[in-house]
Image: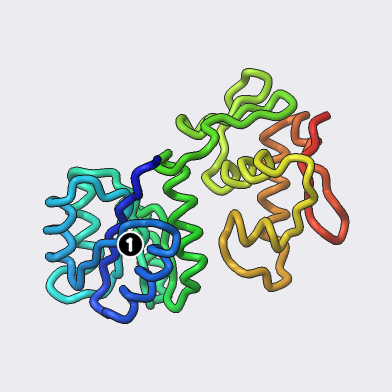
Amino acid sequence: MVDRLKILVVDDESRMRKLVRDFLVKDNYIVLEAGDGEEALDIFYKQKDIALIILDVMMPKMDGWQVCREVRTSSRVPIIMLTARTDERDELLGFELGVDEYIMKPFSPKVLVARVAAILRRTNQLDANKTLSCGGIQVDRDAHQVLVDGRQVDLSYKEFELLVYFLENKGMALSREKILNNVWNYDYFGDARTIDTHVKKLRSKLGEKGDMIKTIWGMGYKLEAE
């Protein structure tokens, strides 16, 4: 039996912590809570085996950025930042500090839990097929590496996630809505440009193998081995 993973939820609003905790517990995670940054660091250093931190930006005593900086001096534990602010400078700062995901409030708890699972799979803390392959394309999740006929191909983070999703669902017709919900984890509002742009870049980087990603007109895409 796989050990249940521990997630530290840090937010000064107890209602927010409870909401997030309830959804995570339902997915079989162990949840630890902290109401401010100092308490969060105390728990983090005592526990040693926390798999992921969900961290609010605006908190008393020590804000989320300070906590993130402190954690990053000794650990690469995945961090998801929560913020009510829409300033893109915040987002850029988060990624500079090594934040793995950045989620705006208000958010769907289901989306948050989906992001948690995706990050834990990516960091190999959740069971997942470590390697995927199809028609000469090989993906090694551990090394975050893609080989096409033995030649290494460099993909962006989203291109990599998109390719993994296609490989996990090869032969299946995938609507743009499904792709957005599973790769970008937000609801579909009729704007397909994000997906179409990424698919175009992914096809280009895969060379001839890019033809395996078929367009299903009016619907989405499907990966088929040649």
Going 65% across and 29% down the picture, which residue do you hit?
133
The residue that mark 1 highlights is 54
> Residue 84: x, y in percent?
38, 77
- Which quadrant would the C terminus be assigned to in this image? top right
- For the image, the number of numbered tags is 1
| Mark 1 closeness class: few <14, some 14–19, many ≥20 residues within 10 Å | many
The amino acid pointed to by label 1 is: Ile
Going 57% across and 41% down the picture, which residue do you hit?
160
> Residue 136: x, y in percent?
71, 23
> Residue 131: x, y in percent?
56, 29
Going 46% across and 64% down the picture, which residue do you hit?
112
> Residue 49: x, y in percent?
24, 46
Considering every residue shown, the one lying at the far top of the view is 150
Q: Looking at the image, is 146 positioned above or below residue 74? A: above
Considering every residue shown, the one lying at the far front of the view is 1
Of 27 and 106, the residue lying toward us? 27
Of 31 and 142, the residue lying toward us? 31
Q: In the rendered image, which quarter is residue 102 located in?
A: bottom left
- Which quadrant would the N terminus be assigned to in this image? top left
Considering every residue shown, the one lying at the far right of the view is 217
- Report the side of 204 relative to 96 (left or right): right
Q: Secondary structure at mark 1?
A: strand
- Report the side of 157 relative to 85 (left or right): right
The colour scheme of the drawn protein is: rainbow
Going 64% across and 60% down the picture, which residue do you hit?
180
- Report the side of 69 relative to 89 (left or right): left
